[in-house]
Amino acid sequence: MQNETRSFYDTLRRAAWTTLRARLIVPYVLLTLLVAIVGTYIATRLVVSSERERFNNQLYEAARVAADGLVRRERAHLTDLRLMAFTQDVPAALAEGDKAQLQARLLPIATNNGTQLVTALDSRGVEVLTLARNLNAAGIEYVSSDGADFSAFEPAVRVLRGETDADGDKFIGFFTTQQGTFLVTAAPVRADDGQIVGALLVGSPLQGLLVELKTQSLADIVLLDLSGRFIATTFAEPDEGRQVLELTPAAAQAAGTGPDRELTLFGRRFQVVDAPLVIRNQTVGVLSAALAADYVVQAETTSRNIISAIFAVLTLAVILLGFVLAQGIARPLLRLRAVSQAVAAGDLDQQTGIRREDEIGDLALAFDVMTRRLRERTQEAQRLYEATVESNRELEEALAQLRAAQQQLIQSEKVAAIGQLTAGIVHDVKNPLAIIRGLAELMDEDPNIDEANRKNLAVIRDNVKRASRIVSDLMTFARQSNLERSEGDLRNTVETVLRLTGYLAREARVNVITELPEQAVIATYDAQQIEQVLVNLIQNGVQAMPKGGTLRIRVSRNGDTAAIAVQDTGVGIPPENLNRVFDPFFTTKPPGEGTGLGLSVSYGIVSSHGGRIDVQSTVGYGTTFTVFLPLLPVELPGADQGKTA
């Protein structure tokens, strides 16, 4: 009986193993369990490593953000120094030790720019004036002092000696006052002859700066000097003293090359990364960023538990899916249905991939053929559509070029017509003016004329001179002189114009910025006439900035065309006036300040060179005039015959 029972169970076991479902499921379950165990181990290791790497990356990023913040603050110092050093009367006041004049010039700049500390030193390194912002005051308040000796402060000494390095004549350092330690940038102050008459120091309090950097980098910051000694930190005073934050001189010199260090502060572990603080290509100290390492261990434990749970759930899901997949008869139909839905949604790249020798296989093959033909026809339609769009774009570009050419032609004809009319009028006005001027000078020589009439004669002569200048402008507009072209570098022409207009810009408190290419921009042009155009554009730009601003001159080259852009930050031109700026006699200036011919004459000069002038303007933000000149000479009909007046 026992033998019969054993034989029955053996037969049942063999029958179960020989079924297709058993052959699919048993190996599938075993393999799934093996993959789950191995996958859980590998994933846990990867996540733990990822958490550690993320923590390290965050720490290094915090150090980089802090270093960048210090560099940005030093650049802000440079901006303040340039503005103060080139402020009118500052060099003279510093040379004379005029504290009142220095305070009158420097205090408004410091107030407007939010400068924390500014110190003016004479040529001996003695403090003439220091303005330090009182951070405890309710409003903006500066405390002044003088008389301190800075002859031992290395950045000031180097500046006063006239030393320079690869980055210029400015130097940086740390300076400790009663208000704390400051990050200080020193720059020379030169007289008009270039001689150093003193130095200016601009500084920011390190403690407040480090607190700001902590907010940005989300890490505590420690600043050490080159010997590893403590300077400033965002940490509270540790129980162990600040010495625990310091480095040995050897470790400070090796900062950035060795492994990270760990500190225990306030009962917590911190990981610290040390890096050299480099500003203006000078290593001025050691910058350390610190993050609490407690949460990394907690994150690793949490991640391990979560991954184990996920893999357990996924393993059960995969095993259950194996039983479902045993019902293989439904798979081709489900696949065909999914592909049909994807094609209906617009995805024509779908293929069933079913290869069977039955009715389902025939249906899948017919569906694949239908989808392939539909995809080919859709691609052809898309190609035709893109070709049509491209053709329309080319037509729009051609139409835009035609409109621009039409506008230039209209402007040229308008200028020519008014020029002919002006030429006739000038002849009729010039001779009477000459007669009036001559008679006025003749009467002025008469000794019998009383003082009142002599003053009237002076008024007549002044107004005749003004009228003569207007007539000269009209003659310049009416008579386009012959071009005297020669080959030259447009960069030299721009530099010549900048020298001619430099005094005008300085008087108007306009900062001129030039952007010239390193390579020569050679063109064939009339240098004198192009200089006239640029002088006119620069004068207009300066006059558009009555309160000062920035004028940017940029020269560029694109193929066979050179572009000279004159960009100001002035009041701008209203949109309704943009199409009229090149019209003769059109001006927005007050009466008596212009004839409205400058831009018209400039337009004619550039057109005679085969070029054009474009204008772009935004009210309240400024205007940009761009002169486009061909690098090769362009012969225009009648360009060299000129007009006679």
Image (tube, rainbow, N blue to C red):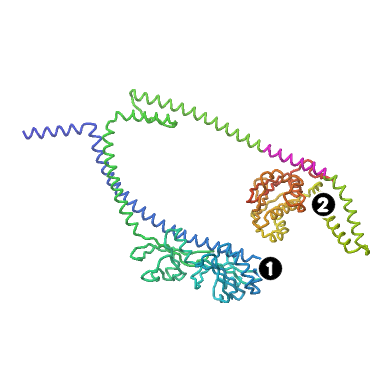
Tell me the SS state at disc 1.
loop
Q: Which residues are magenta?
A: 401-421
Can residue 253 be seen here? no
Name the amino acid type tagged 1: Asp
Crowding at dot 1, Cα within 10 Å, few <14 / some 14-19 / many 20+, comes out as few
Can residue 310 be seen here? yes
| Residue highlighted by disc 1 | 192
Rendered position, 109 above or below 347: below
Out of 354 and 57, give the one closest to the viewer.
57
Q: Is residue 485 left or right of residue 511?
A: right
Q: Is residue 564 left or right of residue 74?
A: right
At 6% from the left and 35% from the top, the residue drawn is: 2
At 33% from the left and 28% from the top, the residue drawn is: 333
| Residue highlighted by disc 2 | 472
Q: Position of residue 365 (x, y in %)?
A: 39, 25
Q: Is residue 617 left or right of residue 525?
A: left
Q: Position of residue 406 (x, y in %)?
A: 71, 38
Q: Is residue 152 left or right of residue 229?
A: right
Out of 10 and 627, give the one closest to the viewer.
627
